Image (cartoon, rainbow, N blue to C red):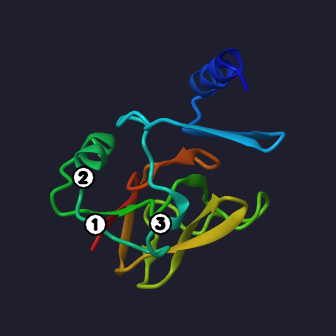
Amino acid sequence: MDRREIRRLADLLREYGLTEVEVEREGVRVRLRREAAPATASAPPAAAPAASSLELPSPVAAEASGADTAHLLTIPAPMVGTFYRAPSPDAPPFVREGDRVKKGQVVCIIEAMKLMNEIESKVAGRVVKVLVENTQPVEYGQPLFLLEP
């Protein structure tokens, strides 16, 4: 590989927003890697925590609700992926605003790397707000639901 080919690989890295590219040709291997920008960085799939979690309200959740959210809890996305409100396109959503949820109840699915991960609530409460639209991509830690305990 010459400099021109390596430069083309670097251009592809930037153009497509990739963090790593590796090419092997005739026994020569070249790997280019760059750090993701902090604003777009996401947790690697291997570092994703368990599929259910609960945190105190975040500023993003408070902004999204437009109401007094000091007493509300958020259910954040435990991984990067695609948010689904229902188990299939023709099925009703797992939960709707106003529904009561039990501890351990499935509230949504996040698809990550072709795997469907059921997200469970860690507390009982009432769903005040669904913060994400169906089939929308979500980031690690992004608030999905606001719950009133």
Q: Name the spot of residue 91 as percent of width and height, x first.
A: 74, 65
What residue is disc 3 on?
48
**What amino acid type is highlighted by mark number 3?**
Ala
**What amino acid type is highlighted by mark number 2?**
Ser
Residue 8 quadrant: top right
Secondary structure under tag 1 reads loop
Q: Is residue 78 above or below residue 142?
A: below
Q: In this view, which residue lies farthest toward the right?
A: 26
Looking at the image, do the residues carrying marks 2 and 1 touch, with CB atoms under 8 Å apart?
A: yes
What residue is disc 1 on?
55
Q: Is residue 1 left or right of residue 40?
A: right
Q: Earlier in the sequence, mark 3 or mark 2?
A: 3
Q: Kindly identify the residue that appears in the image at 73 percent across and 61 percent down.
A: 114
Q: Name the spot of residue 67 as percent of width and height, x first.
A: 23, 46
What residue is disc 2 on?
58
Nearer-the-camera pick, 92 or 131: 131
Q: Is residue 138 left or right of residue 2?
A: left
**Gap in Å between the C-alphas at discs 3 and 1?**
16 Å
Q: Kindly identify the residue that appears in the image at 33 percent across and 66 percent down.
A: 147
Depth check, mark 3 against mark 1: the one in front is: 3
Quarter of the image containing the C terminus?
Answer: bottom left
Q: Earlier in the sequence, mark 3 or mark 1?
A: 3
